[in-house]
Every structure is written in C-alpha cells, then in structure tokens.
Amino acid sequence: QVQLVESGGGSVQAGGSLRLSCAASGNTYSRHCIGWFRQAPGQEREGVARIHTVSGATYYADSVKGRFTISQDNAKNTVNLQMNSLKPEDTAMYYCAAGGGRWYCPGWSPADFTYWGQGTQVTVSS
C-alpha cells in the first residue's frame, strides 16, 4: 500500500506561482513513478508532470512545459510541483499518483497509476 497526501493548493492571480507537495509513504516498490494530474469540472483527468524517482527522469505535458517543474526531495519523501506563470486555464483539482516500476514510468493515462491522493484545489483568477 502507498499513501499520498497533497498540500499547497490555493488561489492566486494569473501570472502568480504556487508550489504543490505530495508526501508519499508506504511500499517503496509501488511508487517509483510519481505523477501530477489535474481535473477541471466537466473535463477528463489529465497528466501534468511525472517523475521517475529512481532515474530522476521527468516528463511534462506540452501545456505546462517551461512553467511547471517537478522535483523530488528524498529526505522528506516528497515530490513537489513548482507552478509559475499560472493561467486561468490551470484552475483544477490537482492530484498526485503513484505507479510504475523500478525501471519504468507509466505514460499519461490515469489508469496506469495505482495509488492516488485526495487532491488539492488550485484556482487562478484573471
């Protein structure tokens, strides 16, 4: 089992920044890949960024490249998502998810991630 707890959401004006954190605990072998996903009302859940915690490889959706940065803090067992230059279209519930294996990180399909946090709301006003 893996437990994931998100924090750091909030409200910000367009152009602002927020930093989300995902605290992970439990079975290390089930959380080698940590992904951040988001879901706006009436829309499908979409992948934003993911990191393979063994290799350090990172992946970003085109919509956030150059604005968001995913990183890991091994000492704290957290994965962070630094979000800069936020836009109103970034407004959504943000979730972290765990999956993958020691040598691979799943793609952008939420179905490929086994464990999920409860989510944290990000609201960007224009």
Image: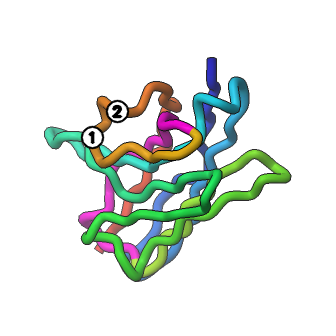
In percent of width and height, residue 13 lies at 41, 74
Residue drawn where x is 45% and y is 41% of the image = 95
Q: Residues within 10 Å of mark 2 (few under 14, many from 20)?
A: some
Which corner quadrant of the image does residue 60 belong to? Answer: bottom left
Name the residue type under label 1: Ser
Region of the chain picked out in magenta, as a range:
86-101
What is the residue that sits farthest to the front in this orientation? 103
Q: Depth check: 10 or 55 in front?
A: 55
Residue drawn where x is 70% and y is 49% of the image = 78
Is residue 5 positioned above or below 58 on the image? above
| Residue 88 among those drawn in magenta | yes
Asked if marks 2 and 1 touch (Cβ < 8 Å), the reply is yes
| Residue 51 among those drawn in magenta | no
The residue pinned by badge 1 equals 109
SS class of the residue under badge 1?
A: loop
The residue pinned by badge 2 equals 112
In the picture, measured across the screen, residue 115 lies left or right of residue 30, that is: left
Name the residue type under label 2: Asp
In percent of width and height, residue 67 lies at 42, 78
What is the residue that sits farthest to the right in this orientation? 75
